Image (tube, rainbow, N blue to C red):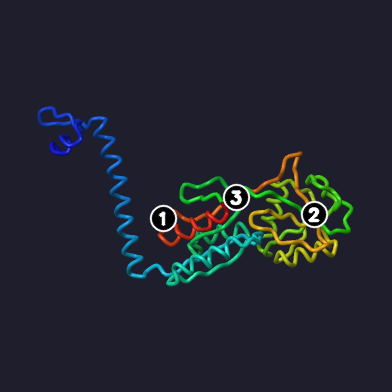
């Protein structure tokens, strides 16, 4: 201790006969040192795991509303650099992806934010996506250059959702996004767009990725609520206690593509 104090040029403890008291500088040095030592231990553990090939898989989930190319491009780039890692990918609703993270069946999830950020997770923000509505070109609303959610109250809202999540998704679209329409459901984005072409309703979409080109039978119009552009925040989530080198590398690659 005397050597350390001499090196730093400050007192870390105040000595009083047979007792001592930690100084403010000593308290600071102790707290910061514990953090640094724990990080060193984590780096050593991660290095051993990578070197012994114990971590050889990456399980990725993405929300079924996502249609961009960023995810597939990142998977291709990552696989070129780390061919030893087996990657599995699945899509799902917000709640299905959240359940996968909680249970540990997913390592990473590209998902929309519906809950307050939790300290138990890394919450990497990717994009605050602007919302649109897709309509049949035959709809009387298709000539507008912007639409309010209230303009759509007379039409059915098409939601992409599994059967088990329909009630949860309906409540979110109604209470949070502000749709007062009836809801009908599709299993995939492709099925939903066919329903739009057939005049069965409108499809809310977000520009979280690069949206596909539309045929002449469909129109995509910016969506507003109370005269403010409707947006939704998309993030990459993973559990802090399950983080690792490959997870962090993949996350950084995906973040760069969205940036």
Are there few (<14), some (14-19), or many (20+) residues within 10 Å of tag 3? Answer: some
Measure how far apart labels 3 and 1 are at the Cα level.
24 Å
Label annotation for residue 187: none
Image coordinates of residue 86 in percent, x first then y, are 47, 71
Q: Which image quadrant is residue 247 in?
A: bottom left
Nearer-the-camera pick, 73 or 11: 73
Residue placed under numbered mark 1 in the picture:
241
Image coordinates of residue 150 in percent, x first then y, are 81, 45
Nearer-the-camera pick, 207 or 176: 207
Label annotation for residue 127: 3
**Is 37 on the left-hand or right-hand side of 159?**
left
Q: Which one is closest to the eye, mark 1 or mark 2? A: 1
Residue placed under numbered mark 2 in the picture:
182
Image coordinates of residue 242 in percent, x first then y, are 42, 58
N-term-proximal mark, 1 vs 2: 2
| Whether residue 55 is situated above or below residue 12 in the rendered picture | below
Are there few (<14), some (14-19), or many (20+) residues within 10 Å of tag 2? Answer: some
Q: Which one is closest to the eye, mark 2 or mark 3? A: 3
The residue that appears at 33% across and 67% down in the rendered structure is 51
The residue that appears at 76% across and 58% down in the rendered structure is 158
N-term-proximal mark, 2 vs 3: 3
Image coordinates of residue 63 in percent, x first then y, are 62, 60
């Amino acid at each position: 201790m005397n050597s350390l104090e001499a090196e730093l040029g400050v007192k870390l403890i105040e000595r009083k006969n047979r007792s001592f008291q930690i100084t403010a500088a000593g308290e600071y040095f102790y707290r910061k040192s514990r953090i640094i030592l724990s990080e060193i231990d984590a780096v050593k553990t991660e290095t051993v795991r990578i070197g012994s090939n114990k971590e050889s898989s990456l399980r990725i989930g993405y929300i079924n509303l996502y249609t961009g190319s960023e995810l597939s491009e990142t998977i291709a780039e990552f696989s070129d650099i780390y061919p030893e890692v087996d990657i599995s990918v699945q899509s799902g609703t917000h709640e299905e992806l959240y359940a996968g993270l909680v249970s540990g069946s997913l390592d990473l999830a590209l998902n929309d934010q519906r809950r307050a950020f939790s300290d138990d997770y890394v919450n990497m923000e990717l994009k605050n996506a602007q919302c649109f509505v897709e309509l049949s070109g035959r709809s009387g609303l298709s000539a507008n250059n912007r639409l309010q959610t209230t303009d759509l109250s007379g039409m059915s809202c098409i939601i992409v959702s599994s059967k088990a999540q329909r009630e949860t998704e309906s409540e979110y679209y109604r209470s949070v996004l502000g749709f007062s329409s009836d809801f009908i459901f599709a299993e995939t984005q492709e099925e939903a767009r066919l329903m739009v072409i057939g005049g069965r309703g409108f499809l809310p979409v977000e520009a979280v990725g690069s949206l596909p080109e539309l045929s002449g039978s469909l129109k995509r119009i910016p969506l507003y609520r109370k005269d403010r552009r409707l947006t939704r925040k998309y993030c990459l989530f993973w559990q802090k206690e399950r983080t690792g080198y490959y997870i962090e590398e993949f996350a950084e690659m995906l973040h760069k593509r969205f940036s």
